[in-house]
Image (cartoon, grey):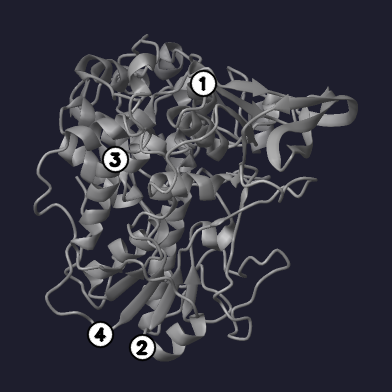
């Protein structure tokens, strides 16, 4: 319900219940988080892994390095400080999964005659191969490096993401029949289009160009490095050491990887230099915590001005010390209050990444904006040349792996439509399925007890041990006890309180027992009017209220604030007429395999 409408809420629309499951709504790939947590609670790790993989493709990888957009959205943080450790539970399923034989999609014996080229073997191209190979497409991925994975391999250090995990999950896709051409950079899009014989081309080459910092002295020393290039050189063993004093310029996740990697290559004093206060950092909070635990010093309010070179040697960097006047989360004014020179042996620039397409000729019909980013449809990911598609960082600039995966799912769907002459805008619809959790008169097949447990802490390798080798994984993963306690913190937000107005006798039993006062029976009205009559104030205006049909006794309506509800099920247990029921909502988000008319036997694998 929205605006001035008094029409009862249409819960058949997929987005209604999807938005109630805040973690799944926040996840770009729409992973069914509560369901896989319940599967883990039951010890069904392989089922949890397969359910994860259906949407996010890389559970083991993302269970370690995802940016976790699901966690800030988690409803657990509305009743205590910290959300459920969703990402780390994903890793549990990946680490403990069993045999996947017969559980993953496979390429059919007879291909469909369509050939697809993917540029770059990062998460976006791999996802396109994952989606299209089972539909009979002949997919070839071209990778300029000697190993697949893109920035997952070259820019995420192995102490965070072990190569064995990368190799396993990439191998699952290659085993579907996806061809991989290593050490094969694409030098010309024109040649690929005119002589490759491909029906469509997907560009998943990432954002491989690190941003420069053109200051005095920048090109007078070889000890000033571009962050992502430097990390790549470390990953492929081209660099094995660094100076004792290192400055990192930038405060994003790449900067955190650079500072921690420096320590493992011999640095003894590492400083991360930030131009602005900590509240403006781009790095994830847990990345900052891990860096500071390893004694990295983060210095704020220092603006870089010059590299200090003496006798052709880098000896330090000059900074302006800044002061800021803040108004909330906005900088109202700034001023320099002095200068300082900080000595160093090496400087690593980690101030951002950019797209780079020197190999795409500008007369092919593939258009770019002023920032040299491709003009791509935000839904279909088709470029201005119909057979060329983009996804991941190559499409819309640097984000993270989970965004690359979802964009690639949608690009693969578009390629499938394009190759069979169908409109790219006529996409399979999303959907929602509800299934009752009721087992008896007052029994439901889910655990609705509220666990008062605090978020479990991830165990780490000791500081003494973690620096002995570059590839020692720092995070150890949850043990069985930690897993059991953490899964109990999930509030089962996908088990919805479904209301049947015609069964309600307005006895107020549900209202009396609701522990958070999220239910109100009142006269019908606009949403704005209803918000003034709620038993508890609505704290989240972006989440719409549930508004029932008129109740037969008085014509009033049942109103529910979905934001406050903790899905405890007490309303359904107490209701004498079963007007309330607890029903699991399963959201279906379209991918290329859905309703495929060419290969109807292909079905998405779920738990």
Assign the N terminus to one quadrant of the image: top right
**Residue for badge 4:** 113
**Direction from residue 536 to residue 122 in the image, left or right:** left
Q: Where is residue 569 in the image (x, y as percent from the top left)?
A: 34, 22
Q: Secondary structure beneath disc 1?
A: helix
- The disc at residue 60 is 3
Instruction: Kindly indicate whether the residue at mark 2 contacts the one at mark 1 (C-beta within 8 angstroms).
Output: no
- The disc at residue 277 is none
**Direction from residue 67 to residue 133 in the image, left or right:** left
Q: Which callout, 2 or 3, points at the residue further toward the start of the chain?
A: 3
Residue at left offset 73%, top offset 47%: 218
Structural crowding at the residue carrying mark 4, measured as other residues with C-alpha within 10 Å and reported as few (<14), some (14–19) or many (≥20): few
Q: Position of residue 388 (x, y in %)?
A: 49, 77
Q: Secondary structure beneath disc 3?
A: helix
**Residue for badge 1:** 289
Q: Is residue 389 above or below residue 571?
A: below
**Residue for badge 2:** 197
Pair 1/4: label in front: 1
Q: Secondary structure beneath disc 2?
A: loop
What distance separates the C-alpha of mark 2 from that of mark 4? 11 Å
């Amino acid at each position: 319900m929205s605006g001035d409408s008094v029409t009862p809420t249409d819960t058949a629309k997929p987005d209604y219940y999807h938005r109630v499951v805040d973690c799944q709504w926040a996840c770009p790939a729409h992973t069914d988080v509560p369901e896989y947590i319940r599967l883990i609670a039951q010890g069904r790790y392989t089922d949890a892994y397969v359910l994860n993989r259906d949407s996010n493709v890389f559970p083991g990888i993302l269970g370690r390095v995802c940016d976790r957009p699901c966690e800030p959205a988690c409803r657990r943080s509305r009743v205590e400080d910290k959300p459920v450790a969703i990402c780390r539970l994903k890793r549990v399923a990946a680490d403990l999964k069993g045999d996947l034989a017969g559980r993953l999609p496979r390429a059919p014996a007879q291909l469909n005659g369509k050939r697809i080229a993917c540029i770059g073997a990062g998460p976006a191209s791999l996802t396109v191969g994952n989606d299209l190979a089972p539909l009979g497409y002949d997919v070839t991925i071209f990778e300029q490096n000697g190993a697949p994975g893109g920035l997952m391999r070259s820019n995420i250090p192995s102490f965070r993401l072990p190569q064995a995990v990368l190799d396993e999950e990439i191998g699952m896709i290659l085993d579907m029949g996806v061809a991989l051409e290593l050490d094969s950079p694409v030098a010309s899009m024109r040649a690929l289009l005119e002589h490759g014989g491909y029906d469509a081309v997907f560009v998943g080459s990432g954002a491989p160009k690190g941003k420069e910092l053109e200051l005095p002295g920048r090109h007078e020393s070889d000890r000033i490095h571009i962050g992502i290039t430097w990390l790549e050189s470390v990953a492929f063993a081209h660099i094995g050491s660094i100076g004792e004093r290192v400055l990192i310029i930038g405060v994003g996740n790449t900067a955190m990887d650079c500072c921690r990697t420096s320590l493992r290559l011999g640095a003894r004093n590492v400083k991360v230099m930030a131009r602005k206060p900590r509240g403006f950092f781009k790095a994830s909070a847990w990345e900052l915590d891990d860096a500071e635990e390893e004694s990295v010093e983060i210095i704020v309010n220092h603006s870089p001005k010059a590299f200090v070179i003496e006798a052709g040697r880098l000896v330090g960097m000059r900074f302006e010390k800044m002061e800021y006047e803040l108004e909330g989360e906005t900088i109202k004014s700034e001023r320099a209050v002095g200068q300082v020179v900080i000595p160093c042996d090496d400087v690593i620039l980690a101030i951002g990444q950019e797209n780079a397409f020197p190999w795409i000729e500008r007369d092919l019909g593939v258009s770019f904006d002023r920032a040299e980013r491709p003009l791509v449809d935000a839904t279909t990911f088709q470029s201005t040349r119909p057979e060329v598609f983009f996804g991941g960082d190559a499409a819309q600039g640097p984000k993270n792996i989970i965004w690359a995966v979802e964009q690639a799912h949608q690009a693969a769907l578009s390629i499938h439509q394009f190759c069979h002459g169908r409109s790219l805008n006529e996409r399979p619809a999303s959907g929602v399925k509800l299934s009752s959790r009721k087992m008896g008169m007052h029994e439901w097949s889910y655990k609705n007890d509220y666990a008062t447990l605090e978020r479990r802490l991830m165990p780490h390798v000791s500081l003494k041990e973690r620096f002995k080798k570059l590839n020692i994984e720092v995070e150890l993963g949850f043990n069985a006890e930690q897993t059991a306690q953490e899964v109990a913190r999930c509030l089962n937000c996908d088990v919805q309180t479904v209301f049947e107005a015609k069964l309600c006798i307005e006895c107020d039993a549900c209202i009396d027992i609701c522990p958070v006062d999220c239910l109100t029976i009142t006269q019908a009205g606009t949403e704005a009017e209803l918000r003034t009559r709620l038993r508890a104030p609505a704290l989240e205006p972006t989440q719409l209220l549930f508004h029932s049909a008129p109740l037969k006794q008085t014509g009033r309506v049942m109103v529910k604030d979905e934001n406050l509800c903790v899905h405890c099920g007490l309303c359904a247990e107490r209701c004498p007429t079963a007007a309330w029921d607890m029903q699991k909502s399963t959201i279906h988000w379209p991918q290329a395999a859905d309703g495929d008319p060419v290969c109807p036997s292909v079905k998405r694998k779920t738990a």
